[in-house]
Amino acid sequence: MANPSILILAGDGIGPEVMAEVKKIIGWFGDKRGIAFDVTEDLVGGSAYDVHGTPLTDETMAKAQAADAVLLGAVGGPKYDVLDFSVKPERGLLRLRKEMDLFSNLRPAQCFDALADFSSLKKEVVAGLDIMIVRELTSGVYFGEPRGIFPDNEGGRVGVNTQRYTTDEIRRVARSAFELARRRGNKVCSMEKANVMESGILWREEVQWVHDNEYPDVELSHMYADAGAMQLVRWPKQFDVIVTDNLFGDLLSDCAAMLTGSLGMLPSASLGAPTESGRPKALYEPVHGSAPDIAGQGKANPIACILSFAMALRYSFDLGEEASRVERAVEAVLADGARTADLMGPEGGVPVSTAGMGDLIVQALDASL
Ligand code: IPM
Ligand code: MG
C-alpha cells in the first residue's frame, strides 16, 4: 500500500522557515517509527504569485484535493499589499478552504505549564488552560454574496459584504463541535450576535436543534460573541469547546491564542467531510501569520507549525498516540527552558533559533523511544 500523502505549501514570510522544522519531524517518523509519508511541495500565496501571477494555480489546487493532508505555513507580506484584491496571497488560502470545503476549523488553545508565567494574564487564569475553538470556515461574511465596492447614488461608494448562513452549514459545524466535546469536557458554548443579527438568531436555533435532537448528553450554552470575548479574558477555563462563525472565530481565536503566551504556539486543523478513504479532507496550519518583520532571521517559533503536524497525525492519520508524543516532546523542550524570541519573557530562558528549537524537539522525540 502507498504511503499516505502530504502536500506541503510553505508559503511566504516565516512559512518556509517553520516548515523546514516540520520536515525534520516528518523525517524522524519515517526513520525512527517506520511511519513514512509521501511528501510533495508546492507554492501558495505571494510566492506562487511571484512565479505564476496567481496565489494558487489550478494544478496546485488539484494536488491539494488529492492529498491525504495539506500542511500550510503562512501567506502574505507587505510586498503584496499593492496587488489587486483578487490575486492577494490570502485569496490562495481562502480558495483552498472553500474548494476543499473545509468547514470545521479546530483551533485549540492550550497553556503549557512552562509558559503560564508568560501570558499577559495572571498565571492562575491561564495555568492548565485547554479549550478548543471550532470556527466555521467556508461561509459567513467571508464568502457571502453580494460583495464588492460599488458606486452609490450620491457620487460616493459603498462597500458591501454579506453575512449568510444556511441550516446545513450551521448544523454540520455544530455536529463537529459536539463530537469533539464528547471526547473532551462534554461542554459546548455557541457564540453569535443573535441580539442584532438574523443570521445569529438562525445560528442559535440550529445549534440548539442539533443539540436537542442529536447530542442531548452534551452541555450546551449560548453567549453573545462580544460577551464571549470578555469572558475569554476574564475566566477562560469556564470553556471547553466554543463553536462560532467564520468572522467571530477569526477574532476569538487570536484572542484565545494570546492567553497561551504567544501566537507562535497555536496550531489549527481545517477539516471537511470524510472522503472515500475515510479520512476527512484536511489542511493544517499555524494560527500565526507570515510575520514578514522577522522572516529570514531564524527568530520564528516553529512550534505552532509542528503542533499542526501533530494535529494531522491525530485527525488525518489516526495516530493519536504519536501526536501526543510530539506534544510531549514540545512540552519537555519548553520545560527545559528553550525559548525562541517570542517566548523570551522577563523570567528569561535559553535563547534558541528556529532551527535550534526544531533540533531540540527531534532530540526530545529520540528520548521518548
Ligand atoms: C486566519 C487568518 C486568515 C483569516 C487570513 C490570513 C485570510 O487571519 O486564518 O485566522 O482571516 O481567516
Ligand atoms: Mg486570523
Image: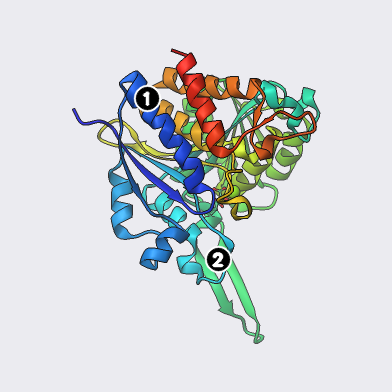
Q: Quadrant of the C terminus?
A: top left
At x 47%, y 20%, the residue is 365
Amino acid type, callout 1: Phe
The answer to whether residue 351 is above or below residue 337 is below
Label 1 CA crowd tier, 10 Å (few <14, some 14–19, many 20+): some
| View extreme (top): residue | 369
At x 42%, y 64%, the residue is 49
Residue behind mark 2: 79
At x 60%, y 44%, the residue is 249
> Regarding mark 2 in the picture, which secondary structure is present there?
helix
Amino acid type, callout 2: Lys
Q: Based on the displayed image, in which of its 4 quarters is residue 292 positioned?
A: bottom right
Q: Based on the displayed image, in which of its 4 quarters is residue 350 positioned?
A: top right
Residue behind mark 1: 29
Confirm or reject: label 2 Cβ below 8 Å from ligand 1: no
> Regarding mark 1 in the picture, which secondary structure is present there?
helix
For residue 218, side relative to residue 281 (left or right): right
Q: Earlier in the sequence, mark 1 or mark 2?
A: 1
Residue 280: which disc? none
**3D distance between C-alphas at marks 1 and 2:** 36 Å
| View extreme (bottom): residue | 155
Q: Residue 307 location in percent, x, y?
A: 51, 31
For residue 360, side relative to residue 263 (left or right): left
Confirm or reject: label 1 Cβ below 8 Å from ligand 1: no
Q: Nearer the viewer, residue 97 or 258?
A: 258
Q: Residue 256 location in percent, x, y?
A: 66, 37
For residue 218, side relative to residue 284 (left or right): right
Q: Nearer the viewer, residue 190 or 355?
A: 355
The answer to whether residue 65 is above or below residue 185 is below
